[in-house]
Image (spheres, grey):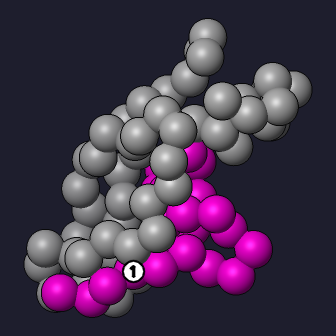
Amino acid sequence: MNGTIWESVLTCPHCGHAEAQIMPADACLWHWPCPSCGARLRPKPGDCCVFCSFGSVPCPPVQAQRRGGGGS
């Protein structure tokens, strides 16, 4: 996936904790436990994963789709 950004900063909407995470290439991350407050983040309705809902960069498959690549 040429031009894919692999690191996204997840930010907890409950406490504001932000943490850089490496995104998987071909899987969605359905939940992320905030290491600061313990909230379990899940994707917002319509989003495929927590990176698309709470990350600074959407997941690699969404990035590819937006570039016209159609997925992984």
Q: Nearer the viewer, residue 43 or 15?
A: 43
Tag 1's secondary structure?
A: strand
Measuring from the top left, give residue 2's x and y in whole percent: 61, 11
Q: Which residues are magenta?
A: 38-59
Residue where numbered disc 1 is placed: 41
Instruction: Give residue 49's position: percent from left, percent from top.
Output: 55, 63
Count how many numbered circles sit on residues in the image: 1
Task: State whether residue 63 appears in this view.
Answer: no
Q: Quadrant of the C terminus?
A: top right
Seen in the picture, residue 37 relative to 35 is either above or below; the reply is: below
43 to the left or right of 66:
left
Q: Residue 39's image quarter?
A: bottom left
Position of 55 with respect to 40 (left or right) is right
Residue at horizontal 41 percent and vertical 40 percent from the top? 24
Question: What is the quadrant of the N terminus in the image?
Answer: top right
**Quick one: 71 or 11, which is closer to the camera?**
71
The residue depicted at 83 percent of the width and 31 percent of the height is 70
Residue for point 81% across, 24% down: 69
Characterize the local packing of mark 1: few (<14), some (14-19) or many (20 or more) Cα atoms within 10 angstroms.
many
Residue 62 horizontal/vertical position (percent): 69, 43
Main SS, magenta region, reads: loop
Looking at the image, residue 33 lies above or below residue 5 = below
Q: Amino acid at mark 1?
A: Leu
Residue 53 seen in the current view: yes
- Specify the farthest residue to the right: 68
Residue 54 lies in the magenta-colored region: yes
Asked if the magenta segment contains residue 67, the reply would be: no
- Looking at this rendering, what residue extends furthest in the top direction? 2
